[in-house]
Image (tube, helix red, strand yellow):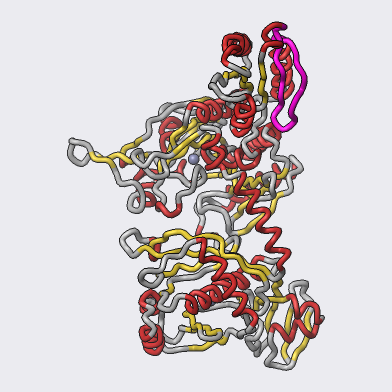
């Protein structure tokens, strides 16, 4: 008999060998039906793999992350099987599970191009294969046999992968006529995959290398129940409507120019207005919290980044150093603002009385991302951090965390992120060598973060081993209006840079001490934050923030002059107003401006011009009746004041 220990520490005895499935069956038939994979001694594996000695076990259903991973990864095999049947000669690259579903990188046979019209065919084939209830059969294979097997089938990409594997550790999995090189784990058969959807195709370089062949990446998702797929697709549809790239275009906020370069966002006047307003909002709060704003150049000398350690990190795989006519002179595009701020700290002698010193900058940084990784404003090559660095004594860390948390709270509240989570990343207590800084300072900072969260009533998940080598941190994640999670602000303690830059302050004891540095960015970056805000609000920004608050719509050209008069008055009274004086029917104007998500539309015609009034339409609420335009200006100002008086 062997002892199997469950996550709740209960123990059951079984005759060896026993499988995960048999263990599930011994608990309940229902569980045996729902379980998709298991973790044995912490390693995820198939349900039919024999367990021969005492072990810990965790049974995974589709609901948990590991379960989904096995489910989706098996679905990738299933899709490959379908592709192989439908398009003989298809070559396969890799097919992993991802956060939502799975993909397979494939090289389609000569003359075949996969596009949306093929998707239903692939889905139908997948369903047909599922109905065959094929088992996935694991097979250990020698390197030579593997190379021969895949070579005979023209699978050159698989052979490239095999060539890098160690002989004796190679396995294949076969279901039906399809054999894949894989380590697993998988479902025992494809039968539980009850609902599938091929979602999209994209071009992807083999192994992400721009010099290698361009393959087709086929994305899909699958579920154990049809209803789950329907719900997912509905959510996806909603997400599509909220896509910040589309809304950014509708609202004329930003665009990308091939000539300027990939991943380099260009902010249009309305987007710029939005961004400046967000920055001013944060500026105002920061001023209250004692931050001092600075400005630093977009480049920095090589030695700055050698000192900071960024040269080693960003030197090779990022933007290359800039050379000047002068020999041996090299500059780097700034990948972070921290080194510049360390120099500002070091520019004069500091005493304990100067601390905490809070240096803030809306600093633009440049980081190279592979073109396939770029996505709207969320993955870019140039972005502006709402950055600040706090230099303080170790005793001040907790107080500073509390203050930054206050700022983040004000922001989330003002922008209606009701739902947010925090994660505290601490050191791995079993691997202290990995981290720099003494035990005492780490303990002090880690406790400071934990206590600060407690004091604020913030429930935060604690993750051991997730801290950077140079200090613990606190991350904020928001849930948007349709339940997606986005990583936003971070507060990070850093013992490394003060050391590297030999930063000092004179203590009350007249001795020199090293300050602690705290990096913090409540928005994260302006680009990413704007993207999240657009998707959260679907472009319906709060009135105080939105680029245009009001559009005046004359019902015909005859009333353009009156419309201008109204607009001038409103603008003079701090209401951001534009006029739509195109020669279009009023219905068309209303529709077009609804798309631009301007909160108020003022329709003006004969009656309004004669009476000095406007007919008010509110976005999403329709007709609000008419009023004197002076009263309307007052109403908007009151509305904005009531929103902003708390920040
Ligand atoms: Zn696999
Ligand atoms: Zn920093």
Q: Main secondary structure of the magenta part?
A: strand
Q: Tell me what residue is drawn at x 54 percent, y 72 percent.
A: 76
* 321, above or below 14, in the image: above
Q: Tell me what residue is drawn at x 45 percent, y 67 percent.
A: 105
Q: Residue 15, percent across and down?
A: 73, 93
Image quarter hosting the C terminus: top right
Q: Quadrant of residue 550?
A: top right
Q: Tell me what residue is drawn at x 63 percent, y 53 percent.
A: 236
Image quarter hosting the N terminus: bottom right
Give the magenta-colored segment's residue range. 611-630
* 468, above or below 578, in the image: below
Say if the magenta span includes residue 626: yes
Q: Tell me what residue is drawn at x 38 percent, y 49 percent.
A: 314
Q: Using residue 276 as the reference point, say whether residue 156 is left or right of it.
A: left
Asked if one can make out residue 144 in the rendered structure from this viewpoint, the answer is yes
Asked if one can make out residue 338 in the rendered structure from this viewpoint, the answer is no
Q: Quadrant of residue 414?
A: top right
């Amino acid at each position: 008999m062997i002892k199997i220990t469950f996550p709740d520490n209960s123990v059951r005895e079984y005759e060896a060998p026993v499988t995960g499935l048999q263990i599930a069956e011994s608990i309940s038939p229902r569980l045996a039906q729902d379980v998709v994979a298991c973790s044995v001694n912490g390693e995820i594996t198939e349900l039919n793999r024999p367990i021969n000695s005492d072990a810990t076990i965790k049974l995974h259903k589709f609901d948990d992350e590991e379960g989904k991973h096995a489910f989706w990864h098996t679905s990738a095999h299933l899709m490959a099987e379908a592709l192989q049947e439908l398009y003989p000669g298809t070559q396969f690259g890799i097919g992993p599970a991802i956060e939502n579903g799975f993909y397979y990188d494939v090289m389609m046979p000569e003359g075949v191009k996969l596009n949306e019209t093929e998707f239903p065919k692939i889905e139908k084939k997948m369903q047909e294969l599922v109905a065959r209830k094929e088992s996935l059969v694991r097979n250990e294979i020698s390197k030579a046999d593997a190379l021969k097997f895949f070579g005979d089938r023209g699978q050159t990409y698989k052979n490239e992968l095999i060539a890098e594997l160690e002989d004796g550790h190679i396995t294949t999995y076969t279901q039906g006529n399809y054999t894949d090189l894989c380590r697993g784990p998988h479902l025992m058969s494809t039968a539980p995959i009850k609902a599938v959807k091929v979602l999209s195709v994209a071009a992807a370089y083999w192994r992400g290398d721009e010099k290698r062949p361009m393959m087709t990446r086929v994305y899909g998702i699958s579920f154990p129940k049809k209803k789950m797929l329907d719900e997912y697709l509905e959510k996806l549809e909603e997400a599509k409507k909220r896509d910040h790239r589309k809304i950014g275009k509708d609202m004329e906020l930003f665009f990308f120019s091939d000539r300027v370069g990939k991943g380099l966002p260009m902010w249009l006047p309305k987007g710029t207005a939005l961004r400046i307003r967000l920055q001013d909002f944060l500026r105002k709060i920061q001023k209250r919290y004692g931050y001092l704003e600075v400005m630093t150049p977009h480049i920095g000398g090589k030695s700055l980044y050698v000192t900071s350690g960024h040269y080693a990190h960003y030197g090779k795989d990022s933007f290359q150093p800039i050379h000047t006519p002068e020999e041996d002179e090299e500059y780097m595009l700034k990948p972070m603002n921290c080194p510049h701020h360390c120099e500002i700290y070091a520019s004069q002698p500091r005493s304990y009385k100067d601390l905490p010193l809070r240096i803030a900058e809306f600093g633009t940084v440049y980081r190279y991302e592979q073109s396939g990784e770029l996505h709207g404003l969320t993955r870019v090559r140039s972005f502006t951090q709402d950055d600040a660095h706090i230099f303080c004594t170790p005793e001040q860390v907790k107080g500073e965390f509390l203050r930054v948390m206050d700022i983040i709270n004000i922001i989330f509240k003002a922008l209606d992120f009701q739902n947010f989570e925090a994660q505290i990343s601490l050191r791995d207590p079993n691997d202290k060598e990995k981290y720099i800084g003494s035990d005492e300072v780490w303990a002090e900072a880690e406790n400071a973060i934990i206590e600060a969260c407690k004091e604020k009533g913030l429930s935060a998940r604690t993750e051991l081993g997730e801290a950077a080598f140079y200090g613990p941190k606190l991350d904020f994640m928001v849930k948007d209006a349709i339940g997606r999670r986005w990583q936003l602000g971070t507060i990070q303690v850093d013992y490394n840079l003060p050391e590297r830059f030999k930063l000092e302050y004179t203590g009350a004891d007249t001795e020199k001490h090293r300050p602690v540095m705290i990096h913090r960015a409540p928005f994260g970056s302006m680009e990413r934050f704007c993207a999240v805000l657009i998707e959260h609000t679907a472009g319906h920004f709060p009135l105080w923030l939105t680029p245009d608050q009001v559009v005046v719509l004359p019902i015909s050209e005859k009333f353009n002059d009156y419309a201008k008069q109204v607009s001038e008055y409103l603008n003079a009274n701090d209401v951001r107003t534009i006029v739509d004086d195109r020669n279009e029917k009023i219905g068309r104007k209303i529709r077009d401006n609804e798309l631009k998500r301007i909160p108020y539309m003022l329709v003006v015609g004969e009656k309004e011009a004669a009476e000095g009034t406007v007919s008010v339409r509110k976005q999403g609420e329709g007709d609000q009746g008419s009023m004197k335009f002076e009263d309307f200006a007052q109403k908007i100002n009151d509305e904005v004041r009531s929103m902003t008086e708390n920040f």
